[in-house]
């Protein structure tokens, strides 16, 4: 399949959020990546429901919501109601992951699991068949603009191998430090959804940066 591009609005200009959402609408991006941070699971706080609802009001593309929060079960319905297309929870934040995934599906959303850089891919073995997507973190979650961790290529290949055995139609997303220098290698390793924050929003030509990642 052709890979998808999901610009992360964490790197947008929050004082001009409508403008930046419209830039994504009019670009070659496929999804909008929405990072939710609670100051507990990760050391940073991003934004909550009013912002997600405001983004949804203007976005013409699906919202790919990445929950970096403890006990995400408490908020799944609220994020579905706020307009999430896809809900990603962290493996490390979900003691009853199978239950959480079923709850996401019952809400009518696509269900995805993220793994931190230190989390072994083999831990997904008994849940991967139930997933629409796996998100491989290529930085430690919590902040935009961090350095890409090189070991990610191996992890993506491992997820790809597991998915070939158990769930070949599942998507593989990579998030953190993605730019035009590593995008092709990530796709070759098996990624088919690229999240990009700083590499898009710090570019002088933002739609051009999205186009470059899309047509790599
Ligand atoms: C990091 C977030 C990312 C972040 C990516 O915790 O999950 O989605 O926005 O930003 P860049 O592309 O700048 O690393
Ligand atoms: Zn993210």
Image (cartoon, rainbow, N blue to C red):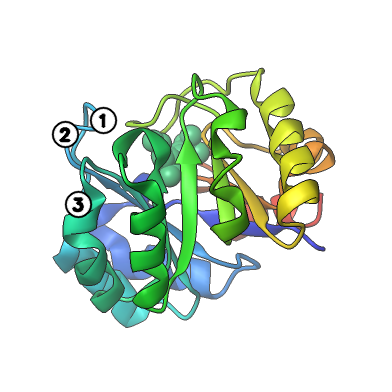
Determine the quadrant in which ligand 1 lies.
top left
**Label pair 2/1, CB-CB below 8 angstroms:** yes
> Which residue is the site of mark 2?
39
- Quarter of the N terminus within the rendering: bottom right
Q: Give the CA distance from mark 3 to mark 2.
A: 11 Å
* Percent position of residue 142, x then y: 32, 31
Single out the mark in the foreground, 3 or 1.
1
Give the residue drawn at x 34%, y 76%. Answer: 107
Q: Is mark 2 within 8 Å of ligand 1?
A: no
Q: Which label is found at residue 65? A: none
**Nearest the camera: 184 or 115?**
115
Which quarter of the picture shows residue 53? bottom left
Is residue 206 visible to us here? no
Q: Along the horizontal axis of the image, is 136 left or right of 113? A: right
Q: Residues within 10 Å of mark 1 (few under 14, many from 20)?
A: some
Q: Give the CA distance from mark 2 to mark 1.
A: 5 Å
**Label pair 3/1, CB-CB below 8 angstroms:** no
> Which residue is the site of mark 1?
42
Q: Along the horizontal axis of the image, is 39 left or right of 207? A: left
Badge 1 marks a residue whose secondary structure is: loop
Is residue 172 visible to us here? yes
> Which residue is the site of mark 3?
47
Q: Is mark 1 within 8 Å of ligand 1?
A: yes
């Amino acid at each position: 399949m052709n890979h998808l591009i999901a610009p992360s609005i964490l790197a947008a200009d929050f004082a001009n959020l409508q403008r930046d959402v419209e830039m994504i609408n009019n670009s070659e991006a496929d999804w909008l990546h929405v990072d939710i941070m609670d100051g507990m699971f990760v050391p940073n706080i991003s934004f909550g429901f009013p912002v997600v609802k405001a983004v949804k009001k203007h976005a013409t593309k699906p919202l790919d919501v990445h929950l970096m929060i403890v006990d995400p079960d408490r908020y799944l319905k609220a994020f579905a109601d706020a307009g999430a297309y896809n809900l990603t929870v962290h493996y490390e934040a979900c003691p009853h992951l199978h239950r959480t995934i079923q709850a996401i599906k019952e809400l009518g959303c696509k269900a995805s699991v993220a793994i931190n850089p230190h989390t072994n891919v083999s831990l997904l073995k008994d849940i991967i068949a139930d997933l629409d997507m796996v998100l491989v973190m290529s930085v430690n979650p919590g902040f935009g603009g961090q350095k890409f961790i090189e070991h990610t290529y191996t992890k993506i290949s491992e997820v790809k191998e597991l998915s070939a055995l158990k769930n070949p139609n599942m998507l593989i997303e990579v998030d953190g430090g993605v730019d035009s220098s590593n995008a092709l290698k990530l796709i070759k390793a098996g990624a088919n959804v690229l999240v990009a924050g700083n590499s898009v929003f710090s570019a002088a030509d933002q739609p051009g940066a999205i186009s470059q990642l899309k047509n790599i």
